Image (cartoon, rainbow, N blue to C red):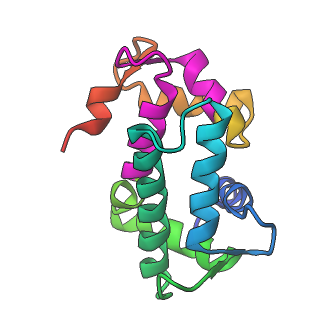
Amino acid sequence: MISDALRAEYEHRFSTYDTDGDGYLTAQDFTERARVLTEAVGEPADSAKAQALRAGMRNTFDELAALADVDSTGRLDREQFVAAFARAGASGMIGKVVGPSVAATVALADADGDGVVSLADFTAVHRAAGYSAAQAKAAFAALDEDGDGQLLVAAWQAP
């Protein structure tokens, strides 16, 4: 059983990933989400950052599909998605599920390539992803483990 707040977060994620609005998630929805994010920040579609984001998003779909016992060529409905995310969190697998896409998103937010992501850059990417400024700020704070107001791209790219 998950909390109402966590369920609401997972349902919001489902809505943002469901790029075609059909009520199901497929690998294509995750690929499209990566495309939307890279375009929103002006990143070329063939860049290393864009490719990493596509791969990270595909990983997220594949891992969630496996947790939901759905073939990776299949689709997830809202309840399967929520249950898979809850299962990932409860089992300690959440990093395996979202780690590559989070790392790629952090790198994408490093617009100037200096290896540091500011709250402003992070917020810009998350606003493009459909999150509010407050949600982006909360996510940034959760990722900023040392509280210095910046995320180091290298910390997310470590093996």
> Residue 83, image x and y in percent?
56, 75
In the image, is residue 140 above or below residue 26? above
Q: Is residue 137 visible?
A: no
Work out which residue is located at the far right of the displayed protein and give it. 21
Residue 94 rendering spot, x and y as whole percentages: 40, 58
**Relative side of 9 to 97, left or right:** right
- Which quadrant is the C terminus positioned in? top left
Q: Residue furthest left?
A: 159
Pick the residue in front: 2 or 28.
28
Above or below, 116 against 96 in this view is: above
Is residue 134 found inside the magenta-colored segment of the image?
no
Residue at 57 percent of width and 60 percent of height: 31
Residue 110 drawn in magenta? yes
Q: Residue at x 71, y 61 (%)?
A: 11
Give me the residue at 41% from left, 71% from top: 63
Q: Position of residue 143 (x, y in %)?
A: 43, 31
Q: Is residue 116 above or below residue 22?
A: above
The residue sitting at 44% across, 44% down in the picture is 102
**Magenta residues?**
99-125
Residue closest to the eye, 2 or 8: 8
Q: Is residue 105 left or right of residue 128?
A: left
